Amino acid sequence: MRPPLYVHIPYCLQKCGYCDFFSASAPCVPPEYVRAVARQLEHLARAFCVEGWKSVYIGGGSPSLLGAEDLEFLCASIKAAAPLAANCEWTIEMNPETVSRPLLEKAASCGINRLSVGIQCKNDKVLRAIGRRASERNIEKAAELIKNFWPHEWSADMIAGLPFQTKKDIERDIDFIERNGAKHVSLYSLTLEDGTPLKGAIDAGKIPYDEEAAEELWLYGRDLLEGKGFAQYEVSNFARPGFESLHNGAYWAQESYLGAGAGAAGTIYGKPTGWRYTNVLDAAEYMAFWNGERTQNQEARGQDCSQGQNCGGQPKGFTDLNAGGAKQEASQDQNVRAALAFPCQLEALDMATQEFEYIMTNLRTRRGASAAEYQERYGGDLAARLGCKEAARVQKAGGGACQNGQDASRQQKGFTGQKAGAAAWLTKTERSGDTFYSMTREGLLFLNRFLEEL
């Protein structure tokens, strides 16, 4: 198998006020943490018989806090665990205040070929309100360094709907990103997570916030990006043609993936059960296990495909959605659980959960959900599952839903059932002998409501 790989670096100079990801404040990444990640990578590659990494994403936290030697060691460890697939997309996240010429040059020399830069907003007042360390000057300097010393592509992260942010900010920031050569933009809508300092300050009335105005800012940003040729290929992601994120695309297509590092997650889809693991949310415990206990008890703790496992066409340890026979399924399930015998939270995914996740992730994308793929994986009729057949029965009364290439974007009169009403936010496309269902432009805005109606 050639799965995507996610590596989590949970260290930041300062945790942002809106962030609820697993991270900790620190001036740098401890070298012993990088060694622990290397050992987990080795284990995962052997246990799941990884033939190569399809894509690699180093996220955080702030991976740009890695020192040059540690970054080089981490990259070498990734390649030592399994080779990179041909045309592998290898991304590293960087925060503007930690971008430097030596770091960019080291990343490129290690084989990294894509940057994801957390710009969020260039307005200093906004940045202070959300607890970002970066300043407008940091962002401009980082963009200048990238333009002069980074030989590959880069993507910008933005957030719309931040406190004190205006349409002028959105317009200025998108112009800045385009002018500095980014061909991919992730435009997120601010989510106020319980327990974060920003939500606490807003709830206490210390920072003004208008949810409706925030939504308008995101819509304004979306329209500006599309007007500049950045196509919305997923709910929050925009790219010029050919520059879509391959790594994230694998998540949305429901491909199995592996995660290394404290707090990183991985998912192994399979019949009748898939498994999702989240590494322990404690960097000290993570390092203690992989640098100590795991090294002493390697054979007892996990499967190693170099020790008698079948590493042929269908390696043990990686489940196959189309596997046949209860005995084979039980054996695969046993292998997966043995391979995940390390400190993590483990979640069993039954077929109903996997089926719903397939719909949820695929409908987020411009590609959409494939009727043939759905039938092969889950043995059902995707059109009926999405309510398109019910909608068709009342089409004469209310107009067209799920029509070829049509934007049936609003709730149509005559749709008497919830699923028929939800189907009004879908469009159907025929290509390559298959039928794909995707959300209309307006439907993407109501994706969560659509999923609830299913």
Image (cartoon, grey):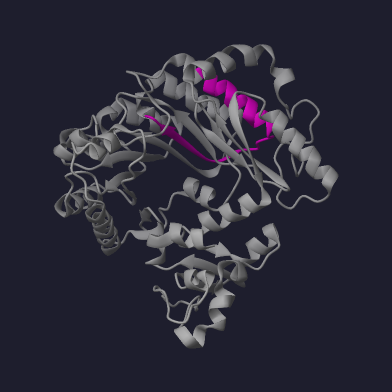
- Comparing 184 with 299, the one in front is 299
| Residue 215, x across and y down, in percent | 28, 55
| Residue 172, x across and y down, in percent | 17, 51
156 displayed left or right of 378: left
- Comparing 264 with 34, the one in front is 264
Most distant residue in the front direction = 204
Work out whether 59 lies above or below 414: above
Work out whether 345 lies above or below 398: above
Q: Is residue 311 visible?
A: no
Please identify the quarter of the rendering in which residue 118 is found: top left
71 displayed left or right of 310: left
Q: Which residues are magenta?
A: 35-61
Residue at the (27%, 36%) spot, across then down: 198
Work out whether 446 lies above or below 6: below
Please identify the quarter of the rendering in which residue 277 is found: top right
Q: How many marks?
A: 0
Is 27 part of what is drawn in magenta? Answer: no
Residue at the (34%, 43%) spot, across then down: 154
Work out whether 368 lies above or below 415: above
- Comparing 46 with 302, the one in front is 302
| Residue 36, x across and y down, in percent | 53, 19
Quarter containing the N terminus: top right
